[in-house]
Amino acid sequence: MKIRKNAFFISIITNILIPLGAVFLALIVGSIFLITAHVNPLNAYYLMFAASFGSLYGITETLVKATPLIIVGAGVCVAFRSGMVNIGGEGQIIVGAILTTFVALKLPSLPKIISVMILLLVGFVGGGIYGLIPGVLKAYLNINEILTTVMLNSIATQVLYLLLRGPMMDPLEKAFGTGYPQSSIITQSAWLTRFFQGKRLHTGIFIAIILAIAMYYLLWKTTIGYKMRAVGKNKNASRYGGINVERYMILSMLIAGGMAGIAGAVEVMGIHHRLLDGISAGYGFSGIVAALFGKLNPLGTIPASILFGSILFGADSLQRTVGIPAAMVYAIEGLVVVFAVSGEIISRKIASRNTEILTEDEK
């Protein structure tokens, strides 16, 4: 009974208290920056969270921000649990969005459900292939996936710039000579349904939650997921046990990239209805933080993404209302990232120490 109580309290500490403490410490340090800008930290943070949760508009915008974070974060959980570090979410989102927009512009007017399903699949294929590249390079050539995914992010960004200033630029922009980097609007049958008139919240939030549940089921309820987690724990032991390590490394990156590609597709279909510069808004990197904050559990990524969605939206609102520089907003967001990752490292050490104690008690 005592061992169970200890395990329960350790679980509370590592899964709840440390993550919340990480955010609290980030806000404390961020208050120093606000004071230097002659801004009252308590008032600023109140305005930030009031903007996110104090009105229907704030809540819907928070969920709009959280939607791609949930999808990307759930995919990151699959990659990280398999021992692969996917930093390429940005590029995978962009490629998924590019391919989704291209196909959507070519699609005839089909029933909404068919159009949406086709484009979600297209987004997955685009992001999945882009995630497959570093997966193959890591599995068979042992090339560091962190380096390749970061470089592929840059390549995707430059390809996006090229397409939006050339082949995929809206013909109306060319005709009027404005040259704004955006594509034509996709067919309305491919738009995700919005819940409220004048609000941007759309059915993509349900898609995100369903995908997170599916990734949880994959990791913890299937043989494939078990093998992925085994590879992530110990590649040599997995190989000795007959698991094709390379196959599951590649598969994890394919799934992670595909999920990021779906996030890009959802952004196109649900928010912008076209391809444009800055389509990702940093969701590829923020999704990693949401996954870590959610303890690399796809279900935990859901509330973590909502929290970070509120911070992202609240920080934007804070910039407009209080007038603090954009760089300071990014600094506060970066502090949350640093403390969230640090909290994850501390949680793992505590969990590891607890395992050692329990083992000694059993002996």
Image (tube, grey):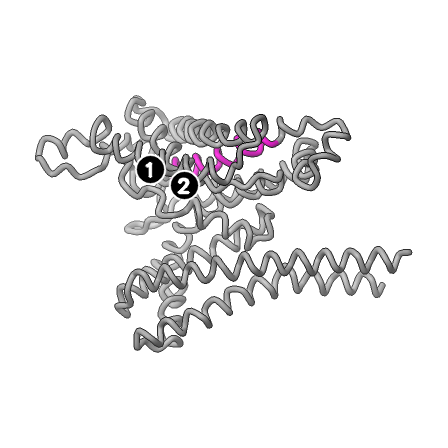
For disc 1, the marked residue is 157
Q: Is residue 113 visible to us here? A: no
Q: Residue 212 placed where, x, y %?
A: 54, 43
Marks 2 & 1, CB-CB < 8 Å contact: yes
Q: Secondary structure at mark 1?
A: helix
For disc 2, the marked residue is 90
Question: In the image, which disc is placed on residue 317?
Answer: none
Q: Residue 112 placed where, x, y %?
A: 37, 30
Answer few, some or many: residues within 10 Å of disc 1's Cα (few below 14, many 20 plus, some between 14 and 19): some
Query: Does 330 sit left or right of 23 as displayed?
Result: left
Residue in front for this viewpoint, 265 or 149: 149
Location of residue 11 with respect to 191 vertically, above or below? below
Q: Residue 62 placed where, x, y %?
A: 40, 55
> What's the residue type where badge 2 is placed?
Glu
Residue in front for this viewpoint, 136 or 79: 136
Q: Residue 333 placed where, x, y %?
A: 41, 60
Q: Which residue shows up at 54% across the image and 56% down it?
A: 341
The image quadrant of residue 192 is: top left
Q: Main secondary structure of the magenta part?
A: helix
> What residue occupies the far right of the structure in this picture?
363
Q: Secondary structure at mark 2?
A: helix
Answer few, some or many: residues within 10 Å of disc 2's Cα (few below 14, many 20 plus, some between 14 and 19): many
The image quadrant of residue 227 is: top right
Q: CA distance from mark 2 to mark 1?
A: 8 Å
Q: Is residue 259 magenta?
A: yes
Q: Which region of the structure is painted magenta?
A: 249-266
The image quadrant of residue 39 is: bottom left
Q: Is residue 111 magenta?
A: no
Location of residue 188 with respect to 16 vertically, above or below? above
Query: Does 25 sit left or right of 30 as displayed?
Result: right
Q: Which residue shows up at 41% across the image and 73% down it?
A: 31
> What residue occupies the far left of the structure in this picture?
176
